[in-house]
Amino acid sequence: MSTTSIFIMIFGVSLVSLLPRILPIALLSRLTFPPLMIRWLSYVAPAVLGALTALSVLAPQGRIDISAGNLFIWAFIPTLFSAIKTRSLFITLIVGILSMALLYNLV
Amino acid sequence: MKKQELLQGMRDSIPIVLGYFPLGFAFGVLAVQVGLSIFQAGLMSILCFTGAGQYIAIGVMQAGGAVVTAILANILVNLRYFLFATSMVPHFKDLPAVPASLLSYGLTDETYAVAINRYQTKPATIAYMAGLNLTSHLAWITSTFIGAALGMLITNTDQYGFGFALPAMYTCLMVLMISKKSDIIAAICGALACLLMGYFFPESMANMSNIIIATLVGATIGVMIHEYD
């Protein structure tokens, strides 16, 4: 790619990646949604987090890997446990990172 | 008050910063290998702030693809933010529209997960959004520059376990987000839909359209069983 193409690519990607985040807030924030819509939107977060957690643990390299060799699955167990027990993001993060470091260096 | 909100946002961004560092670093390394200058790699992280989208764009570049291909792929990859941002709208009703809209540029999977958790119990504020989104973005930019500049020197960050920072954060935020049975079911349905879609249509993993489908499925099932909760 030429230098010009690279800059066109960067600006193009910038535009299409930022607009979907800005536009809904800019255009819809003065609207009042009907109750059913608000309820539906309140389930977006659990659904998204379920999906992101599953993907990040079961497909850490971008393809699905459900096997004993996937260390992320093993690290997930103490991490989930500490999340439920402590409900603290900080502690969960430390437990997760330490578990992963241990697994990586020991297994 | 404002200052406290700003600081809280910055504090809440710490797990994101930890998670972004290896990702931004790796992006910087790859971008330079593919032929971007250090400045261009950094500029891309300043102007785009879309992890997967940026990786895809330089992937297209490496494969000799066209600019249009990189942009089209990014439309698809970033479409999910339309849904995420819309689910923020009810929380932003009392905020000044212009700064709220502008700061929403910093909505990512990670900042969304943190912010929507916070807004379950605390009202959204501009200062909090600024603290969370700008700190996260700054970490993304800084790590890209460092990766682009020193890429050749450091090879393996896996051994320190930072690769698990974002999965650990998602896990905890998911747990915090669950307060009733229908939430659990929405989360499980989202997870299953996402994996099944990724399994049967592997290309949906690359362009992340499986997350859009998973969100639609999970939220719809959640709302359908809401009254039985």
Image (spheres, coloured by chain):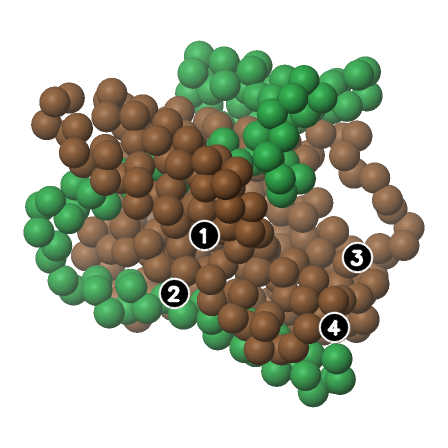
Chain colours: A green, B brown
Q: Position of residue B2 (x, y in %)?
A: 35, 52
| Residue for point 24% across, 59% down | B95
Residue at the farthest bottom position: A4
Q: Which of the 4 image quadrants contains residue B79?
A: bottom left
Mark 2 vs mark 3: same chain? no
**What is the crowding at mark 2: few (fewer than 14 residues within 10 Å), some, or many (at least 20)?**
many
Say which residue label 3 marks.
B29
Q: In this view, does B220 lie above or below B68?
A: above
Q: Distance between the residues labelled 4 and 3?
A: 18 Å
Give the secondary structure at mark 2: helix
Numbered disc in front, either 4 or 3: 4
| Residue for point 68% across, 25% down | A70
Give the secondary structure at mark 4: loop
Numbered disc in front, either 1 or 3: 1
Closer to us: A71 or B140: A71
Q: How far apart are marks 4 and 1 (CA)?
A: 24 Å
* Chain label for disc 1: B
Mark 2 vs mark 4: same chain? no
> Which amino acid, mark 3?
Val
Residue at the farthest front position: B200
Q: Position of residue B180 (x, y in %)?
A: 24, 22
Q: Distance between the residues labelled 2 and 4?
A: 27 Å
Say which residue label 4 marks.
B64
* Chain label for disc 3: B
Closer to us: A93 or A21: A21
Disc on res. A20: 2
Mark 4 vs mark 3: same chain? yes
* Earlier sequence position, callout 4 versus callout 1: 4
Give the secondary structure at mark 1: helix
